[in-house]
Image (cartoon, grey):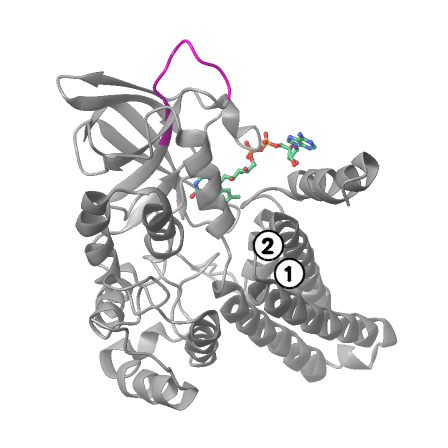
């Protein structure tokens, strides 16, 4: 079937206006980083509505998706964010696993897994980090052995976002015990709802839990649920990382713009806007946001993947967002440091400040991004290859 495309912003806006209403109206602005605990059941139902209308997997090639261009996907994300569409529960499947299966999976894997992701019927989580393997991902110690035609998996993952709602996890595990570091790893697709899997939520600074410890204690996955060849997991896993924060970044920036607008409104309301230092920081935040947008547009229009560009983008937005959280607290003054009254829900400014502490850690910490930039740009200059 030829992909039916040419998405128009007005049509997307009209669809969202018609559907993000009624029972789904309470979802406007819900979910997303720092608020993942909100309205889980209703958000899951909302995603199935999105999926049924063909809005999930927009950029995947036919027959799995609609083959939308980058520009069309950007239009969708911008309209979704502008409408206050809720944070997505199925984004790890849609933006991380699906492109990985499209690039490295078998036809059988694509046929089995892409349609339920597109319908938001199966949610995924990412099982990479371990207590001894975060930045140093090649230190993964979770083991998998082939026994009676199935992988048997034993080990522990940590910081696994949304594992408590996920049906499946893509797990980086060591399948060749004799190999070390990047060799001998495999990329396995593991069902979460089985006796050998235990999910234990981790309480965050925000008082809520959106990531978890995950224990695999002899968990099972069919032998054909390995993406790429056994032992080739490092290559597959790093390709997944390259899909993190693609077209969704422009929608993310509209969320940032809304947060900045709330800070400006608070500063105007309490008079701190008249403080030239605050005004200067607000102007700086506004200018920084324009820079983020132009950087993202340039990166998305590049014809070839640019790993350095992705690292620079991550460094820029994480630092910008963290500074915005600090500004939000400073604008609120002393009142920012206390919760109003029981049940001690955080204000948006407090949640922003606390959750953005994590921005410079997840998706590759600032230090690791700087290492990549140093190696890719300065290293190449030094080696005379640039
Ligand atoms: C909100 C959130 C969600 C997450 N979701 C997931 C998920 O869904 N799935 C998943 O697998 N993981 C997830 N993570 C884990 C995340 O990928 C790791 O926290 C991150 O890779 C850092 O690893 P670490 O925590 O082990 O810290 P470490 O690697 O131990 O780093 C500690 C400190 O040392 C620095 N450091 C480490 N190595 C170097 C080096 N070579 N050079 C310079 N400095 C260095 C780091 O920058 C950091 O400041 C999430 C984390 C957060 C905060």
Q: Is residue 178 magenta?
A: yes
Dots 1, 2 in contact, CB < 8 A: yes
Question: For the point 30% across and 85% down, which residue is it?
Answer: 15
**Outermost residue, top side:** 178
Numbered tag placed on residue 292 in the rendering: none
The x and y percentages for residue 53 are 23, 75
Numbered tag placed on residue 321 in the rendering: 1
Asked which quadrant contains residue 342, the reply is bottom left
Question: For the point 83% across and 36% down, which residue is it?
Answer: 382
User: How far apart in space, not on screen, are marks 1 and 2 (Cα)?
Assistant: 6 Å
- Horizontal relation, residue 315 to residue 305: left or right: right
Q: Secondary structure at mark 2?
A: helix
Give the mark nearer the N terminus: 1 vs 2.
1
Q: Can residue 132 be seen?
A: no
Image quadrant, ligand 1 = top right
Question: For the point 73% across and 68% down, which residue is it?
Answer: 288
The residue to which callout 2 is attached is 356
160 or 73, which lies in front?
Answer: 73
Q: Quadrant of the N terminus?
A: bottom left
Specify the segment rendered in magenta: 172-181
- Horizontal relation, residue 202 to residue 190: left or right: right
The x and y percentages for residue 19 are 27, 82
Q: Quadrant of the C terminus?
A: top right
* 10 Å crowding of disc 2: few (<14), some (14-19), many (20+): many
Q: Secondary structure at mark 1?
A: helix
């Amino acid at each position: 079937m030829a992909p039916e495309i040419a998405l128009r912003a007005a049509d997307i806006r009209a669809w969202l206006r018609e559907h993000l209403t009624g029972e789904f109206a309470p979802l406007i602005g819900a979910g997303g980083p720092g608020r993942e605990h909100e309205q889980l059941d209703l958000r899951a139902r909302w995603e199935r509505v999105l999926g049924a209308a063909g809005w999930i997997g927009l950029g995947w090639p036919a027959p799995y998706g609609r083959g939308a261009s980058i520009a069309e996907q950007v239009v969708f994300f911008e309209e979704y964010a502008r409408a206050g569409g809720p944070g997505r529960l199925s984004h790890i499947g849609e933006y991380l696993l699906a492109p990985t299966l499209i690039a490295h999976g078998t036809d059988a894997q694509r046929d089995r897994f892409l349609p339920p992701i597109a319908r938001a019927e199966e949610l995924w989580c990412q099982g990479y980090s371990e207590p001894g393997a975060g930045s140093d991902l090649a230190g993964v110690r979770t083991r998998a052995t082939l026994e009676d035609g199935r992988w048997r998996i034993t080990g522990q993952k940590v910081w696994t976002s949304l594992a408590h709602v996920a049906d499946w996890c893509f797990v980086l595990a060591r399948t060749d015990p004799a190999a070390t570091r990047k060799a001998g790893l495999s990329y396995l697709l593991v069902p979460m709802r089985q006796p050998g899997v235990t999910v234990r939520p981790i309480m965050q600074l925000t008082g809520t839990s959106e990531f978890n410890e995950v224990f695999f204690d002899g968990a099972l996955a069919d032998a054909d649920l390995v993406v790429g060849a056994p032992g080739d997991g490092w290559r597959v896993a790093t390709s997944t990382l390259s899909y993190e924060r693609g077209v969704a970044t422009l929608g993310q920036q509209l969320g940032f713009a809304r947060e900045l607008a709330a800070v400006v409104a608070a500063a105007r309301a309490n008079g701190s806007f008249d403080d030239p230092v605050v005004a200067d920081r607000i102007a700086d935040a506004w200018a920084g946001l324009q820079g983020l947008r132009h950087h993202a547009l340039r990166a998305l229009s590049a014809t070839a993947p640019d790993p350095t560009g992705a690292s620079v983008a991550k460094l820029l937005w994480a630092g910008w967002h963290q500074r915005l959280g600090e500004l939000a607290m400073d604008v609120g003054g002393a009142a920012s440091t206390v919760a109003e009254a029981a049940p001690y829900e955080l204000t948006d400014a407090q949640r922003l400040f606390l959750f953005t502490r994590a921005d410079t850690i997840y998706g590759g910490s600032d230090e690791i991004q700087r290492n990549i930039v140093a190696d890719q740009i300065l290293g190449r200059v030094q080696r005379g290859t640039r």
